[in-house]
Amino acid sequence: MASLAKRISRAGHVPVVMVDNTFLGPLWQRPLEHGADLVLYSATKFLGGHSDVIAGACLGKQQALAPVRALRTFLGTMADPWTGWLLLRSLETLAMRMTAQMKNARNVAEFLNNHPKVRRVYYLDLLRSEDPTYAVYRRQCLAPGSVISFDLEGGEAEAFRFLNHLQLVKLAVSLGGTESLAEHPTTMTHADVPVAEQRRMGMGPAMVRLSVGVEHYEDIITDLGQALERV
């Protein structure tokens, strides 16, 4: 993203601050209100919301968007009418879906945070006031979203055993859909990242990422609980 921002800056002759807001926006964080020039969304995720769209969106100030529009014209990367229709359908329920997912995630995070087989939970709602990122979260975000990462006690074998025994939660690398999804970052989404860089980013072999869906939170917790019992 940093290299893309530099290219856009050179093309438009203006410095550009670009933010990827797929995980929290547009409901729970609004980077344009905090000084960002451009905001990127994977519309495949929450905006689409039903795991049936591949699309993206770039929003921002007119001057910064000019080179983006030019590049889009050259590459022909416009959404087709069917994709546009699907996105319009999904936008009608965006606030309802993201609110339900966020409320579910709060309950799921609390459950995981108190489970003896979970070493640590990474979720914005669990940040403590002494954490250096807490003030940023409180200033910029309206809610913690619905994506949770957590480290199991053990390592890769324990993470795989947990994932293999999930029944309601599906094993998949996407996020933001109506269904709950779980994945193993170091061997799935970030498999091409060198191990040393994974560790620097805080990812280890025992980490699992969870995208909480709109199912009843008790059903999600029950499934996570029975899978944890197999670890």
Image (cartoon, rainbow, N blue to C red):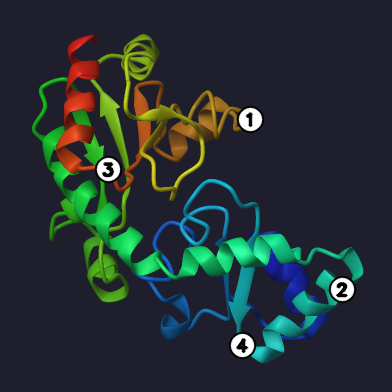
Circle 1 residue: 192
Q: Amino acid at mark 2?
A: Thr
Residue found farthest to the right: 74
Looking at the image, residue 71 sits to the left or right of residue 210; the answer is right
Tell which circle, 4 or 2, labels the residue nearer the N-terminal end. 4
Viewer-nearest of labels 4 and 3? Answer: 3
For marks 3 and 2 on the same chain, the one whose residue lies earlier in the sequence: 2
Q: CA distance from mark 2 to mark 1?
A: 31 Å
Mark 3 Cα shell of 10 Å, populated few (<14), some (14-19), many (≥20)? some
Q: Is residue 226 visible?
A: yes
Mark 3 → mark 2, Cα distance in angstroms = 40 Å
User: How far separated are the C-alphas under marks 4 and 3?
Assistant: 37 Å
What's the CA distance linking mark 4 and mark 1?
34 Å
In the rendered image, which residue does mark 4 sit on?
61
Left or right of residue 195: residue 109: left
What is the tally of numbered marks visible in this picture? Answer: 4
The reply to whether callout 4 and callout 2 are in contact (CB within 8 Å) is no
Sequence-first tag of 3 and 1: 1
- N-term mark: 2 or 1: 2
Disc 4 versus disc 2: nearer the observer:
2
Tag 3: residue type?
Glu
- Image point 76% across, 75% down: which residue? 68
Q: N-terminal of the two: label 4 or label 1?
A: 4
Outermost bottom residue: 62
Q: Which residue is mark 3?
A: 215
